[in-house]
Amino acid sequence: MKNHSGNELKLQEINALEDQITALRTEQADIQKQIKELLFTEDIKAGITFETDIFTLQQSKLRIDTEIQFAQARIGRLKISL
């Protein structure tokens, strides 16, 4: 019985991680859209640049990439142990 309940907990954690990945991918797509908008809005000749904003958004995107990778790895470990 204990093993069965342990597997249920693992399945719940897998589902939670998958939900987290979905939310992170949505956030990632929003960030990518913001980056594109800033790049298209820039006018270097007129002195309108958003390098700091773009850099910050790119860092956020990379952070999200890492969080997704960790969640996927955790899911893989949990699936192996089922």
Image (cartoon, rainbow, N blue to C red):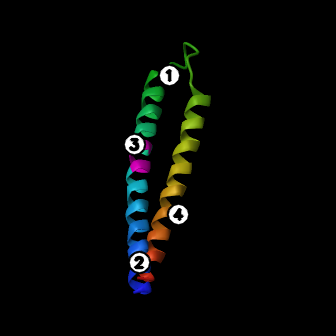
Q: Which one is earlier in the sequence, the residue at label 4 or at label 3?
A: 3
Q: Amino acid at mark 4?
A: Phe
Label 3 element class: helix
* Residue under pointer 2: 79
Q: Which quadrant of the figure has residue 3?
A: bottom left
Disc 1/disc 3 C-alpha distance (Å): 20 Å
| Label 2 Cα crowd, 10 Å radius (few <14 / some 14-19 / many 20+) | few
* Residue under pointer 3: 29
Q: Quadrant of the N terminus?
A: bottom left
Disc 4/disc 1 C-alpha distance (Å): 34 Å
Residue at figure coordinates x 43%, y 72% from the top left: 9
The single residue placed furthest to the top in the displayed view is 46
Between disc 4 and disc 1, the foreground one is 4
Disc 4/disc 3 C-alpha distance (Å): 18 Å
| Residue 5 point in image, percent of width and height | 41, 79
Residue in the foreground of this view, choosing between 75 and 82? 82
Q: Which one is earlier in the sequence, the residue at label 4 or at label 1?
A: 1
Disc 2/disc 4 C-alpha distance (Å): 14 Å
Between disc 1 and disc 2, the foreground one is 2
Q: Which one is earlier in the sequence, the residue at label 2 or at label 4?
A: 4
| Label 4 Cα crowd, 10 Å radius (few <14 / some 14-19 / many 20+) | some
Q: Amino acid at mark 1?
A: Glu
Question: What label does residue 70 carry, if any?
Answer: 4
Magenta-drawn segment? 23-27
Disc 2/disc 3 C-alpha distance (Å): 27 Å
Relative to 73, is 6 above or below?
Answer: below
Residue in the foreground of this view, choosing between 24 and 36? 24
